[in-house]
Structures are given as structure tokens and as C-alpha cells.
Amino acid sequence: MLSDLQKRTAQAIVNVFETGHVGGDYACVILLAGDSGGLTYGRSQTTRVSGNLHKLIDAYCAAPDAACATRLAPYLPKLAARDKALDTDDVFRACLREAGADPVMRDVQDAFFDRLYWAPASREAARLGLEDALSVATVYDSFIHGSWARMRDCTSEAAGTPASCGAREWTQSYLRTRRAWLAGHANRLLHRTVYRMDALLALADEGNWRLDLPFTLRGQQITPEKLWP
């Protein structure tokens, strides 16, 4: 079981991947041409198309003292319908950015990403016998980024299961398999994300399976002080 420090470090890695900040950017709104997820938002960038952006905003609007709830609540039906028009709705996007500065939104996002991404990824890692913090971070990154199950199965078919080849060897095989998939994907936008696998492979090559601090990732130094600002 990971310590709280290891959990925060794993999440910080994904925060850097998604927003360029160790602590994440709770107000970050991104729309990339070619991104099948549509508008993305928050600390680790949840998406409109998945329906998870609706879940996040619904939870925020239901939270006591949410400063922007009355402005965001009217958008809930469109979010539930995964309405593409929201991607370019400047008023909605401005509301999201403003809400990101609200401490209530920050608390809601922390609970949301734990519930929808971290907890399932942790359970999956445990089921596979992936106990190292770096292995759990690898699974979590794919839960956030997408296509975990497909890449898991491809890796096990080619390299064997974690039980048969060893958890660390399997994790490195997974990272190489996923990197090749990203680099060769028909959606050229994914080619730009191979750095995620390169960064995780570099930590494995350094033997930092425990995610001991400090270390630098994508130009961002991750330290205990930055995890508890």
C-alpha cells in the first residue's frame, strides 16, 4: 500500500503531464484540435465527451458555499447531454476558470479525481500485483489519459502477465508498448504525448520505483514542500 507521500507524488506526476504544474491547475480549460475528449478541465483534465465533466460540475454545484454554483448550474443539462457547443462557449469557459479559484472547487476536484480515477487505478494495480509506487503511477496515468485496458491486454499478450514476468518488467513492457501505440496512432495529437511514457521509463531506468523525492519531471522539480504547499 502506498504512503500518502507516494500517492501525492504519483498524482503530481500526472498533474505535470496534464497541466504543467506539480499541484495541478484547477482552473485550466483546454480545447485541442483533434482531441476526441472535447473540452477538458481541472487539476488533471477531465473531459466533456466522457461525461465526467458533468459529474464534476454537478458535484461542485451541490457543494455548500460553492461560489460559482448559480452560474454553472444552468449548464448542467448541456453537460449531461455532452453538448459540443460547450467547447466554444466563452461564457461557460470563463465560469469554469473563475470556479477554479474557489477553494470549494479545489476540494471537490480532489475528491472527484480520487473517486473516479485514483481509487479504480489503485484497485486495478493491486489486482495485478503491481505494488511499486511507479507502477501504480503508470496505471493512474493511463486511467487519466485513456485506453488502459487495451494497452494492459496488449502488454500481457506480448510479454506475459505481471505474475509470470515480474511486476517491474511488466510495467516497463507496458510503458514501451503504450509508447509505440501513442507514437503510431492515427490521431496525430497522441504522438505529442509520448513524453509521458519517456518520463516514466526514465524513472524506471533510474531505479526510482518508490518515487523517492526530490526528482525533476518535465522541468518541474517535485519536492515534499510542493506537495504540501
Image (spheres, helix red, strand yellow):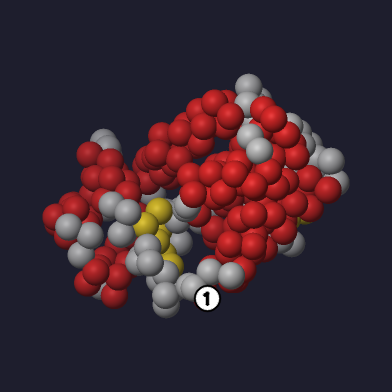
Q: Quadrant of the C terminus?
A: top right
Picture quadrant of residue 82? bottom left
Residue shown at the point (59%, 70%) measured from the top left = 184
Crowding at mark 1 (Cα within 10 Å: few <14, some 14-19, many 20+) = few
Q: Is residue 194 left or right of residue 188?
A: right
Q: Position of residue 160 (x, y in %)?
A: 66, 38
Picture quadrant of residue 31? bottom left
Q: Is residue 174 left or right of residue 62?
A: right
Vertical placement of residue 21 versus 118, above or below: below
Q: Is residue 51 left or right of residue 8?
A: left
Residue shown at the point (58%, 64%) measured from the top left = 182
Residue shown at the point (75%, 39%) measured from the top left = 169
Q: Quadrant of the N terminus?
A: top right
Q: Position of residue 155 (x, y in %)?
A: 61, 46
Vertical placement of residue 149 versus 182, above or below: above
Q: Position of residue 14 (x, y in %)?
A: 58, 50
Residue shown at the point (72%, 46%) measured from the top left = 172
Question: Front-most of 81 and 197?
Answer: 197
Q: How many marks?
A: 1
Q: Which residue is mark 1?
A: 188
Question: Front-most of 48 and 185?
Answer: 185
Q: Secondary structure at mark 1?
A: helix
In the displayed orientation, state which residue is furthest to the top: 1
Query: Is residue 206 shown to the viewer in this render?
Result: yes
Q: Amino acid at mark 1?
A: Arg
